Amino acid sequence: MASDVDNLRIWAAPDHARLVFDLSDPTSANVFSLNNPDRLVIDLADSRLQLDTSRLDLSGSAISAIRTGTRDGDDLRVVLDLSREVNPKHFTLAPNDKYGHRLVVDLEYPGASAVQNPIDPIEAKIREQEIATDRALAEAEISGDPTAEASLPARQDKAKPHPKRDIIIAVDAGHGGEDPGAMGPRGTREKDIVLDIARQLEKIIADTPGFKAVMIRDGDYYVGLRQRTLLARDQKADFFVSIHADAFKSPRPSGSSVFALSQSGATSETAKWLAASENRSDLIGGVDGNLDLSDKDEVLRGVLLDLTMTATLNDSLAVGGQVLDQLGQISKLHKSRVEQAGFMVLKSPDIPSLLVETGFISNPQEEARLRDPSYQRGLAKAIFAGVNAHFRRNPPPASLLAWQRDRQRGGETNEYRIQPGDTLSEIASQHAVPVQTLRQANELNGDVIRVGQVLRIPRG
């Protein structure tokens, strides 16, 4: 049976462009590259084109022009003239609740970053050292293998100058590209509203010393659910917040909600329904990714994941409570506590994560508020106020906020991470600080310390 190409959609992202062919029936495709000049050829068997490609918006993509023609009488040939090198990939998608048959062609840009402002290499190195030390210490303690301590960083005789690094917040605007998300009664698309709120949040974060924002998507394109958390991990994020404005089966529900991951059941029927709805996004986007722990022993891998997930979830719930308190000051709350459900986008074992439902776009009154830029900024300010409050109380040791906190407590300080075999008296002696002063600076009641603990070393 012949297939009609009813529509062709193009989505431009920082690291790739995506073409989606909407087909009346499934068909086979052959995709190959040509050089001098650079072109990509897409041959669709027994297919007919039912649109004018000259009207397509190619801005922001590697495609400079599209040419079409027939081949062998019945086949459709589409030629893309390219302005840069690409690695093409293609796959087909079966019909779902939003689209029919589709052919997806991704043009990946070699060496391009998926985020528009990637982390500074020096800052990334600081974060890598923190993460590597934490992982090595955890493995050494869990395995009980004395040789595991060989992977620990070299012992420091003196505390080093404070890095004063930024706390990195990954801001994830839900949906995007061919996935519009929920739709309001007036036709408002969730993907547009949440991107507006995410950009407001990015600006607030960027204007706050000691913080840096990383946008998981900063345009109208789709990012797979697992890929979102992988991007946050690549950018060494300290926290991940996913912004949504979902719909429910009826127009009555309203109010903001905050969700953390649940490793068991959902805390409410609404939470369960919303999680199931959001987790279907990859059926529309058609991409996926996986966390790789293949280099770890199976038992140790399970223990490490359990420990990190527990610590991460505790942090997520703590931040979620702060965010919920702030949201309650500007809008009605759908639930007065942080809910939990199995959202795929929150399943990062090492990054505290929240999903914020800014409101129900299916509610006509709430849809109108969500379209208001001033209300969007109010939501962004509330989200950041909650995140900021948490990190002011619990700053990462190498962060600017930790350095500021130590200065406020009196006297300049450096830090020392406790290594196997250390004692409090030895550390005090190494840094020429009285033991009692060291206890007071770190609020210790005795001399008990643990491997991996970071001590503030007063000086001056």
Image (cartoon, rainbow, N blue to C red):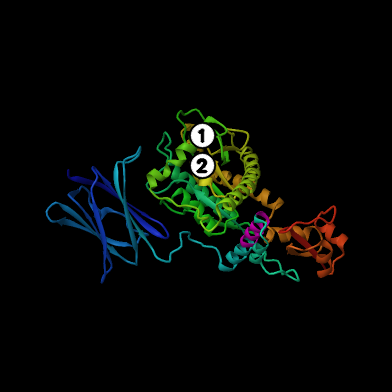
Query: In this orientation, which residue lies closer to the viewer: 63 or 319?
Result: 319
Q: 265 or 210: which is nearer to us?
A: 265
Is residue 27 found left or right of 408 in the rendered image? Answer: left
Query: On the picture, is 298 further left or further right than 71?
Result: right
- Under mark 1, the amino acid is Lys
Residue 326's place in the image compared with 414, above or below, is above
Residue 150 % position (x, y): 65, 66
Which residue position holds label 2?
343
Residue 398: x and y in percent read 68, 62
Query: CB under 8 Å between callouts 2 and 1?
Result: no
Mark 2 belongs to which amino acid? Phe
In the rendered view of the protein, which quadrant contains the N terminus? top left
Position of residue 95 relative to residue 448, above or below, is: above
The percent position of residue 250, horizontal first and vertical second, equals 46, 28
Q: Which residue is mark 1?
A: 272
Spatial CA span between label 2 and label 1: 9 Å
Q: Magenta segment, which residues?
A: 131-142
Residue at horizontal 85%, vertical 54%? 446
Q: Position of residue 388 (x, y in %)?
A: 65, 50
Along the line of sight, the residue nearer the viewer: 248 or 201: 248
Q: Is residue 173 visible?
A: yes
Mark 2 element type: loop
Q: Please name the predominant secondary structure of the magenta segment in the image.
A: helix
Count residues near mark 1 (Cα–Cα under 10 Å), then give few for <14, some for 14-19, many for 20+.
some
Q: Can residue 215 be seen from the camera position used here?
A: no
